[in-house]
Amino acid sequence: MKNQPANSEPTGSSAPADDQTSSPGASGGGLRAAMRPRHLIMMSLGSAIGAGLFVGSGAGIAAAGPAVLVSYAIAGLIVIAVMRMLGEMVAADPNPGAFSYYVGKALGPSAAFAVGWLWWITLCLVVAAEATAAAQIMAGVVPLFPQWGYALAFMVLFTWINLWGVRNFGEFEFWFSFIKVAFVFLFLALGVAFLLGWTPADSPGLTNITETSFMPNGIGGIAAGLLVVVFAFGGIEIVAVAAAETAEPQRSIRSATRTILWRILLFYMGSVGIMVLALPWDDPSLLESPFVAVLNRAGLPVLAAIIGMIIVAALLSSLNANMYGASRMFYSLAQRGMAPRRMGGLNERAVPSLGVWMSVAFGFVAVLLNYFWAEAVLGLLLNIVGSTLIVTWLSAIIAHLILRTRAEKAGEELPLKMWLFPYLSWATLAGLVVIIVLGFTVPDVRTQLLLTFALFAALLVLGRFATRRGVQSADHAVSSPKRSRLDVDEG
């Protein structure tokens, strides 16, 4: 790929120079584009398969009954549209700041500051929560170490992996995601075999949906299920961050976004479809552990017994990816003057090592919390995380609408385009607004939304203050991180 001039304008807008990100490395280079397309594609697969599917799907079924499939269909369409919009912006101008960077181009530096820091803070908390959840399961299944010991081991291991280099990170995440994908395929095959009567237990056939109401809790149940389901897709946006470190971001992000549709249909709706066919929707075992419940019902207790280890692998995969995403967002914020610039350097492996250490710091604090309050720490962390996913997606849609309009007015050709623009973009935005309105009708969700919006408003004010203080003016000569600024590792 030929290098572009370092001072060329970002495709799709004429953004202020002070909101653009450079990628200077330790020796004048930049982030190393060493992640392979297969790494990005498998990461996008893995990011859609996490605790939300393995654990949270039971809560969706309890809320909506068999009609949870409608909830998944609606949420899935929103995810597909959001990822296509992100894909359009990434293909035009790949950047490790992803949606924060694009929001900055569209709405200015204070909005970029708020979106970037909100997402970074959330990922730091999620890293701690996932390390705690994985440690909690391991301490119960293999009680060789206390919960805090497992949490410490996980934090040390994955911090090292993230400091090791982007290609090594990509390879590790590839195989972790492969384990999750392989298990879901196995579950789907065993679920179909059970329903056909090919397993030791008697098949229920279609009785669990024909002998009950499809919507036992009415439209309200679908709405409640939607609130549960939409948060299960959190993390898939990390693909937009990772694309900046692939050698061919346009081809990679195109492949990743094109396969999201069948992934969601197959993995989520296929798995949940088997759950509602295999067991009555109000069976309490679905709420506790839906995959275990189905495998036990199918007469396969041995496989059900190892599901805990698969869930641990899913949590650790998400932990690994979230560490990566947080470190790259911190790096991008530092490069744009929204964090101390001295913390935006790269080590000899072209890894933002200070960004990694800043992003894992709270995870190590959580190890101490696990030592003193092992039983309470996970619930506390999950309650703090809140609903930042909604803010991230909303900001990405708004940025897309503005940048795409600018590009069309300028007559620029985009390498990847959102379908049915602007109608589908506006419809997706409206869908998210409806979800927010529904969220305010549920007390727990309403509290999370209010806290998230309050934090976002505070970050907006802080971002405006920081901008006025000249945080972003330290290096006006820095340009956007074009592919010429990324050292492509051909090895």
Image (tube, grey):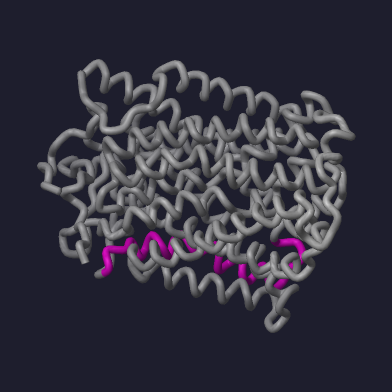
In the displayed structure, would residue 12 be above or below residue 280?
Answer: above
Instruction: Give the residues drawn in magenta, as a range.
Output: 349-377
- What's the residue at 43%, 65% (across, down)? 357
On the image, the x and y values in percent for residue 85 come to 41, 31
Residue extending farthest right: 211
On the image, the x and y values in percent for residue 478 come to 18, 44
Q: Which quarter of the image is occupied by the C terminus? A: bottom left
Secondary structure mostly seen in magenta is helix
On the image, the x and y values in percent for residue 402 come to 36, 22
- What's the residue at 82%, 44% (across, down)? 205
Residue sitting nearer the eye, 192 or 308: 192
488 falls in the magenta region: no
Q: Is residue 479 left or right of residue 114?
A: left
Q: Quadrant of residue 127?
A: bottom right
Q: Is residue 280 left or right of residue 5?
A: right
Residue sitting nearer the eye, 341 or 55: 55
365 falls in the magenta region: yes
**Residue 146, can we see it?**
yes
Q: Quadrant of residue 115?
A: top left
In the displayed structure, would residue 128 be above or below residue 191?
Answer: below
Residue extending farthest bottom: 144
Q: Is residue 334 left or right of residue 119?
A: left
Residue sitting nearer the eye, 374 or 164: 164
On the image, the x and y values in percent for residue 312 come to 63, 66
- What's the residue at 31%, 63% (across, down)? 351
- What's the residue at 39%, 52% (across, down)? 40
**Residue 465, can we see it?**
no
